Amino acid sequence: MTIPVRFGPYGGRYVPETVIPALDELAAAYERLRDDTDFKAELASLLKDFVGRPTPLYRAGRLSEKLGGTTIYLKREDLAHTGAHKINNTVGQLMLAAKMGKARIIAETGAGQHGVATATAAALFGIPCAIYMGEKDIVRQELNVVRMKLLGAEVIPVSSGSRTLKDAMNEAIRDWVTNVENTYYVIGSVAGPAPYPAIVRDLQSVIGREARRQILEAEGRLPTELIACVGGGSNAMGLFAAFLDDGVRMTGVEAAGEGLDTGRHGASIERGERGVLHGSLSYVLQDAYGQILEAHSISAGLDYPGVGPEHSFLHDEGRVRYDSVTDAEALAAFTMLSQTEGIIPALESSHAIAYMVKHSDRFTADDLVIINLSGRGDKDVHQAARALGIMS
Amino acid sequence: MSRLEELFRDRSKKALLMPYITGGYPDLHDCRHVLEAFIAGGADMIELGVPFSDPLADGPTVQASAQQALDAGVTPDDVLALAGEFSGRLPVVLLVYYNNAFSYGSEPGPEQFVAAAAAAGVAGLIVPDLPVDEASEFVDICRGRGTDAILLAAPTSTKERLRLIAGAASGFIYCVSVTGVTGARTALSGQLPEFLDRVRAATDKPLAVGFGVSTPEQAAEVAQLADGVIIGSRLIKMVGDAGDIDVACRAVTKFLQEVNEVLA
């Protein structure tokens, strides 16, 4: 099966001609390797022994009780090496880069989780690595900057535009256009030009495959609903992909920031228009002339004015429902999960928890919910503490 | 044959000169003076950029000029109007990122932008993030409106892709001199002659070279190999550094005259 370039009308390869041959090379390498027995065995072995998979599917008993008795499971991607699902993708892409003989790795990062995961995988494979990160994100995610540097990566501050993920991605693409012949670009979400959305989805789909097997073992039935946060949308696609043919309800939760009507949010699907950003056609936050708007979210990982093209397609098809929660709702859920289950979630993942909290009355005791706990919250404790008034 | 193709065919100089400025830079008013300075310096055609919020094919100089124009409130409509003011005097080519073209008007898709550009007398459109594989609808629309779809070829383009580009493009083929983004460079790539030979082998259409051409010496080198020379970042930097628009325009005119001498 060939790798999809489009999902319905969405996706494509809207990038300069200079990098198109490199995208062709990547697609060909991936198509050759993804079904290769040795490649699959090596990836499985790294996921098990380096990443620590399978991650647990944890029955959150006290949270279930607190929210009216619906059985809630958490897919514990926070327990994966480096503390988030991002590592699933970077280990796989670094394997591709190594097989393709690339001498240098670049990546963009928002919250820093993808940057850390890329730096980690680059260290594992012994390939030099540069990470582009917006100056605003460098300030609010200082811990991850230190981690990337400790792992041997060069962190390149990006001062253009909104100084966040979108601009880091622009700069990474410019680097790639310039150094395309020896450099592998590790995109961190199900976004960017084809074949990246499909590659990242495939590499993240281990989340859903495990969760499906685990829930059948634990409960003897499929879940009634899946909930995951959506920025670019890789943890959500990773969970959803294994259940798309099952008739399971799925909800993607975007960042409503300070409120959808304030204009300060990251809800690309709910409030965006069709547009082209970072190489693919998808829903985008933009003005009437197609200038990209700044997104806003308390969580740096959801602070992105675009979304992966497959999500736009699943939205239009009605297969996945997209909703949003505010910064305040996410913060409340951050605290609630910490104190109810002893798990400090990432602010990104807190959006998925917050959706469950907010809509718990629509669920019954017969419902069986899996929430993707995409990352742990250590990186967010300073910011959350300030926002909650625990610390000045 | 399109207006641009005729211009290349009928030229009496080795290569045509196409200076670039971001539309609305340094502001909408003074941009007109820069365009006048282009004409006084002997420009054969003008490339006008529609400022975009996320110009991923551009280096720092062009990026900053676009940001300054956007901060001053310049819109695609302003740039189209500016093109319309000059398109009767010499051919004007617009550089537009795909999302600005796609999002223009009431319906998603490039149709309305191409129509507006054609109505403004624009001779051709360059879309740096629309490779030939994604361009078929756009090329058809341009053809229907009588404006050229100028596609880009890169040193990394394969023989097969160069053939596709040659088949779809009209006006001229924009040959990117380096693997990289726009911006002045101290020397041209050593691979440029080999690259242009490969493009020539794929097409009879005129070839113009841009990205990194910033001195009369480099322009002279390009004129030995190609039919057109595109200069952008160097001119934007001259305008930005001068501080005073009259000083800037005199410097731009003088510089372009020097370039023109080597192209004669």
Image: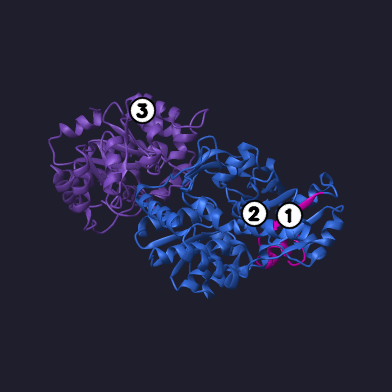
Chain colours: A blue, B purple
Q: Chain of mark 2?
A: A
Residue at horizontal 32%, vertical 40%?
Answer: B151
Q: Which residue is mark 1?
A: A370
Q: Is residue B5 left or right of residue B120?
A: left
How far apart are the two marked residues, 2 and 3, measured between alpha carbons? 52 Å
Residue at horizontal 17%, vertical 51%?
Answer: B221
Q: x and y percent of residue B86 in the render? A: 31, 30
Q: Which mark, by number, is residue B84? A: 3
Count of marks placed on residues: 3
Q: At numbered mark 3, what does the secondary structure look like: helix, strand or loop?
A: helix
Q: At numbered mark 2, what does the secondary structure look like: helix, strand or loop?
A: helix
Q: Chain of mark 3?
A: B
Residue range corresponding to the magenta coloring: A367-392
The answer to whether residue A373 shows anywhere in this view is: no
Amino acid type at image mark 3: Gly
The answer to whether residue B216 shows anywhere in this view is: yes
Amino acid type at image mark 2: Leu
Q: At numbered mark 1, what does the secondary structure look like: helix, strand or loop?
A: strand
Q: Is residue B61 left or right of residue A169?
A: left
Q: Which residue is mark 2?
A: A239
Placement of B10 over or under A247, stated as above or below: above
